[in-house]
Image (cartoon, rainbow, N blue to C red):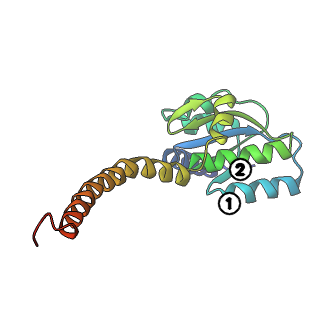
Amino acid sequence: MKSRKKKQEDLDALRARLGKSPTIFVAGFNKLTVAQDFELRKTVRGAGGRYQVLKNTIAEKASAGSNAAGALAGLTGMNAMALTEGDPVALAKALSKYAKDNPTFTFKVGVVEGRVVDVKAINDLSSLPPKEEIYAKLLYLINAPAQRLVTALNGAGRNVAAVLDQGVQNNKFSA
């Protein structure tokens, strides 16, 4: 049995972790084997996240006053959380893929960028393209009009130069 001091240290550590992580996914992991749990932890680390089994009462106390309070209040059963300070889409994709392979792992609720979201929103998030791909598309869309403008401006100058060149070649203009 843990001492009161050790429980308080666990509470403070969880409170600090929740304060730093804007994205949290809470899931049930009933009947996972040790090998499946090891694979899950490896998957979460690969997506830039962190995985932790929750004690429901400590999680509720640690989340009081934070964005995660709505997600971690009133939990029952065996629960765990995956959290990240990085890309929420990458973590959602990794967890969704793992949940498809292991039906005993189920999403319960999440917090994405400070907002509590349900299971449907988590699944929608996992179907988004990665952040880098969205940035690339956005940069292309921003850059495309500028490229067209430069092409049009160059085309006008090129056309004037071609007309002048033809006039010189036909002796209509003197050089």
Determine the residue positioned at 22% across, 70% down. 169
| Image-based side of 96 in relation to 110, left or right | right
Quarter of the image where one finds residue 153: bottom left
Name the element at disc 2. helix
In the picture shown, does residue 82 fall above or below 111?
A: below
Percent x, y of residue 161: 22, 63
CA neighbours of label 1 inside 10 A, class few (<14), some (14 to 19), many (20+): few
Residue 174 in the image, given as x and y percentages of width and height: 10, 70
Question: In the rendered view, would you say 88 is above or below 156?
Answer: above
Structural distance between the alpha carbons of marks 2 and 1: 8 Å
| Front one among 122 and 51 | 122
Which quadrant of the rendered structure holds the C terminus? Answer: bottom left
| Residue 5, image x, y percentages | 60, 50
Q: SS for tag 1?
A: helix
Asked whether disc 2 touches disc 1, contact meaning CB atoms under 8 Å apart, the reply is yes
Task: Check disc 2 and report the residue beneath it.
Answer: 94
On the question of residue 162 being in view, the answer is yes
Residue drawn at 16 percent across, 68 percent down = 171
Depth order, front residue of 4/156: 156
Instruction: Please tell me which residue is depicted at 55% across the width and 52% down the height of the picture.
Output: 133
Residue flagged by tag 1: what amino acid is it? Gly
- Expressed as whole percent of the image width and height from the top left, the position of residue 3 reads 67, 50
